[in-house]
Image (cartoon, coloured by chain):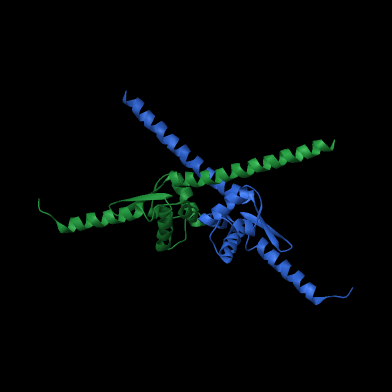
Chain colours: A green, B blue
Amino acid sequence: MRFKPYYFAIYLSNWIVQTDRMTSAAPTLDTTFHALASPVRRAVVERLGRGPATVTELAEPFDLALPTLLQHLRVLEKGGVVASHKRGRVRTYRIRPERLRRAASWLEKQREVWEKRLDQLDSYAMYLENSDD
Amino acid sequence: MRFKPYYFAIYLSNWIVQTDRMTSAAPTLDTTFHALASPVRRAVVERLGRGPATVTELAEPFDLALPTLLQHLRVLEKGGVVASHKRGRVRTYRIRPERLRRAASWLEKQREVWEKRLDQLDSYAMYLENSDD
């Protein structure tokens, strides 16, 4: 088997793209929350929650130009909210629950903090009320 | 008491600003998620979860120019995540749990949908396994 520079170049470029995705472009809470800050992107998440879908299937309910939808899908992918793979000419998207779970757990943590504080305020108010008697 | 056009103008401009805030600039899931898509703004939310704070108190932990912090606070206020009031020359911010609860409940709803689906896939896989016997 001969060394084929063409295949090697493809292999190399794939490796560079993957490494870039894993380091500088790794999804963070920033990119995840940003991904969710659009009605189209949230609708895509709602749809993919029911199962994987191709670009054509995702485009159907929206009155959007394909490049606009693809742009939204890129933002979702960058936010780690969806992943895609290509088989032949068809690209299929699926949900990636992990990043959504992290966003949810950040919100949940905040809720715990402020509800604990409000409970303490309640207790203090009751203490003041009782000390009036 | 004489009619004072100056006070009337202030009253009118306040009314216009308030009406604008209540209609076109009403917080949505878009503005709420956008508000959370920044480490500074999430740190402010974490701080305010522990209790109200003045702009000076909020500025303390950040190495930020005041106008930059105020810009972040405006984004949070637009997203309905925080509210502020001014007493004398001091503006105090507090958390508004309602919008954060809505964002959390949207995420929670998505989780329910996909976990139900994954459960169904599990059941189907078990059905296939059992029918092999």
Residue B14, position as x, y percentages in the image:
72, 67
Q: Left or right? Give the position of B3 relative to B93.
A: right
In the image shown, does A33 or B118 lie closer to the viewer?
A: A33
Quadrant in which the C terminus of chain A appears: top right
Q: Residue at x 61, y 54 (%)?
A: B81
Can see residue B37? no
State which quadrant residue B29 falls in: bottom right
Residue B121: horizontal and vertical position, in percent?
Answer: 41, 36
User: In the rendered image of this protein, does residue A16 appear above or below residue B121?
Assistant: below
Q: Is residue B69 above or below residue B126?
A: below
Q: Is residue A121 visible?
A: yes
Residue shown at 44% from the left, 47% from the top: A48
Q: Residue furthest top?
A: B133
Work out whether residue B81 or residue B44 is closer to the camera in this orientation and state it: B44
Q: Which residue is the extreme one toward the right?
A: B1
Q: Indicate left or right for A37 with B129 as reference.
A: right
Q: Residue at x 42, y 46 (%)?
A: A96
